[in-house]
């Protein structure tokens, strides 16, 4: 079966309604029922609770509290690299931005302008730059950290679809990451600007950042834009910057001639937060 045929049912599903329902369920504090669901999830997906700061399944009041659990101190040491991996997960794609086009899968790309919500001036800062697309599966740690030090300047919530973001869907839905709902976070770093895009997906109840809290819901159906130019919101390499409630994808953009990727990186390779992503070319 082709990938495009495999994802056809997703076009027919009531994805927004399913996501709303999943969000309410994940936030519910249902005692023994919540514990039973978490215990099933841990067994089904092989979640390593030994890494969690709190490994006791029964102590989590809601599924969301479990899903966004912090790790033990020292569980993710930071590599001595200019850029580190911001999440646990797998590499979907990475490499050079060809003009303004980001490679998604064979025969499938999308523009930086579409990804950042239509702001051509912002997208132009990453022309012929570098990108990395990182997929977080259900079993992974779902907090997102800074790949390098940066000062927050802007955040954009872009409404959109809620397709799954698994590898089959990435191959089968054209422009997937520029079609789904997303939160675009813009930073200034030592090597210039960089962008971290938190991409939503089916049943991803919400996305949150450390400076704003939960960004969605609400979902008003129009683009929302926050400027932080007048604030001194600085985050060190490795600092937490956000989290997903249920799994999804992070897309990062960097300017041209700033990032040389780790030679050990390859598509579909498993990654852990804190490992070396690359070195500065500056």
Image (cartoon, rainbow, N blue to C red):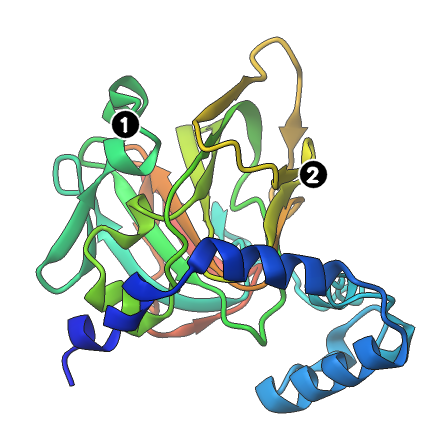
Q: Residue furthest top?
A: 230
Q: Quadrant of residue 40?
A: bottom right
Residue at the location (58% across, 55% down)?
20
Q: Going from the N terminus, do you reach mark 1 or mark 2 first?
A: 1
Q: Which mark is residue 36?
A: none
Report the residue that reaches farthest toward the left.
107
Q: Residues at badges 1 and 2 in contact (C-beta under 8 Å)?
A: no
Question: Quarter holding the C terminus?
Answer: top left
Q: Which mark is residue 210?
A: 2
At horizontal 83% and vertical 68% (from top left) the residue drawn is 53
On screen, residue 256 above or below 57: above
Q: Residue 50 appears in which quarter of the rendering?
A: bottom right
Q: Which residue in the protein does label 1 denote?
A: 123
Kind of element beneath mark 2: loop
Any part of residue 239 in sight: yes
Pinpoint residue 127: horizontal percent, then vertical percent: 20, 31
């Amino acid at each position: 079966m082709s990938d495009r045929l495999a994802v056809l049912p997703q076009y027919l599903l009531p994805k927004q309604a399913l996501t709303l329902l999943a969000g309410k369920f994940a936030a519910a504090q249902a005692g023994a029922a919540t514990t039973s669901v978490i215990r099933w999830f841990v067994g089904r997906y092989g979640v390593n609770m030994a890494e969690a700061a709190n490994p006791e399944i029964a102590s989590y009041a809601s599924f969301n509290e479990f899903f966004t659990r912090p790790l033990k101190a020292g569980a993710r040491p930071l590599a001595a690299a200019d850029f580190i991996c911001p999440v646990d997960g797998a590499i979907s794609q990475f490499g050079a931005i060809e003009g303004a086009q980001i490679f998604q899968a064979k025969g499938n790309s999308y523009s930086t302008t579409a990804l950042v919500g239509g702001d051509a001036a912002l997208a132009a800062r990453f022309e012929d730059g570098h990108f990395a697309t990182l997929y977080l599966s259900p079993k992974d740690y779902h907090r997102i950290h800074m790949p390098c030090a940066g000062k927050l300047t802007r955040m954009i919530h872009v409404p959109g679809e809620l397709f799954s973001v698994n590898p089959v869907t990435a191959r089968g839905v054209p422009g997937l990451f520029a079609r789904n709902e997303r939160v675009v976070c813009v930073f200034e770093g030592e090597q210039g600007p960089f962008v971290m895009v938190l991409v939503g997906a089916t049943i991803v109840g919400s996305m949150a950042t450390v400076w704003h809290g939960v960004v969605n819901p609400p979902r008003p159906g129009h683009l929302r834009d926050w400027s932080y130019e007048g604030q001194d919101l600085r985050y060190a390499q490795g600092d937490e910057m956000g989290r997903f409630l249920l799994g999804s994808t992070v897309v990062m953009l960097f300017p041209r001639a700033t990032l040389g990727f780790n030679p050990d990186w390859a598509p579909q390779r498993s990654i852990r937060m804190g490992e070396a992503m690359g070195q500065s070319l500056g």
